[in-house]
Amino acid sequence: MVDNVIMPESVSVGFKGGPRFITLKVKSDNERITRLQKTVIARHYYSWSQQNRDAALIGVLRNFFYDRRGDFKVFLMKDHTDFQCVACQIGIGDGAQAAFQATKTYTAGSNPYVRIIRHIKAGTLVVKVDGVTKTLTTHYTVSATGLITFTGGNIPAEGAVIMIDCDFYVPVAFEGDAFEPSIPYSLPEVMSIDNLQAVEDIP
C-alpha cells in the first residue's frame, strides 16, 4: 500500500536511476545467444551516493528514512529526469467508453512502451479531448490511481483523441532497513552516504 507521503524535492533530486528490465540470455555450444524477456514491465531503481554533502540535507533524508521506518512504508518520489506527461495520448473515444487510465508512451518509432501513471501530482492534470480542455468534476473525475472517468453526457465521441498533461510521482520504498552516513575528514558539517537505494513498488 502506497502512502501519499512525498519525499522532499531537496532530497529526491540527489537520487539517480531509472527503468530496468530483466533479460535472460542463454548461450549455446556454438556461442549463439538466445534472449528471453523475463519482465515486460520496467521497474525503476534509484540510488543516492553523495559525498561531502551538507549535513543538514543528510538530516532531512535521515528524518524521512525514520518516518518511512526504513523499507517498511512505500512513498512517492519525484524522478527529476522523468516526471512529466506532455501531450500524452491515453485513448481514442468510441462513444461508449468513459474511463481511461493515465499513461505515458515511450517510442523510438517501432516498439512503443506504455507506462501506467498512477500517481499524478495534485493540481497539474490537464485533460483535452480533440484539443479542447475539459474541466475537473464537470467533465471528468480522476481517481487516486490515475483513472480518468468522464461524466454522463461528456463521454468522448467516436474517434475523439484524449490527451493529458501532468506531473507525476514514482511509488518507491527504500531497499533495506539501514541508514549509514559517514563524516569525511572529521568535518561534522558535511556527511556522505554510499548507495542508499529506493525501488519502485509495482502493484
Image (cartoon, helix red, strand yellow):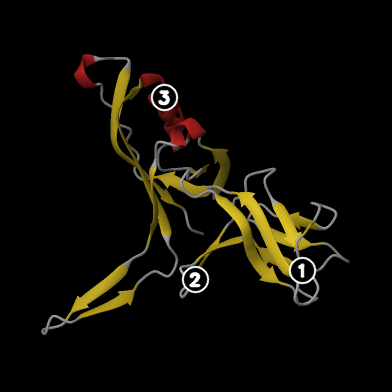
* Dot label at residue 112: 2
What residue is shown at x 62% (from left), y 45% (from top)?
Answer: 121
Rounded to the nearest angstrom, the CA distance separating label 3 from label 2 is 39 Å
Packing grade of label 3 (10 A; few <14, some 14-19, many >=20) is some
Label located before the other in sequence (1 or 2): 1
Foreground tag (3 vs 2): 2
Judging by the rendered image, the residue that carries numbered circle 3 is 57
Dot 3: element = helix
Label located before the other in sequence (3 or 2): 3
Residues at discs 1 and 3 in contact (Cβ within 8 Å): no
Q: Amino acid at mark 3?
A: Leu
Q: Amino acid at mark 2?
A: Pro
Foreground tag (1 vs 2): 2
Judging by the rendered image, the residue that carries numbered circle 1 is 98
What residue is shown at x 46% (from left), y 47% (from top)?
Answer: 81
- 3 vs 40, nearest the viewer: 40
Q: Amino acid at mark 1?
A: Ala
The image shows residue 13 at horizontal and vertical percentages of: 44, 37
- 197 vs 93, nearest the viewer: 93
What residue is shown at x 81% (from left), y 68% (from top)?
Answer: 155
In terms of image quadrants, where is residue 86?
bottom right
Rounded to the nearest angstrom, the CA distance separating label 1 from label 3 is 45 Å
Dot 1: element = loop
- 186 vs 87, nearest the viewer: 87
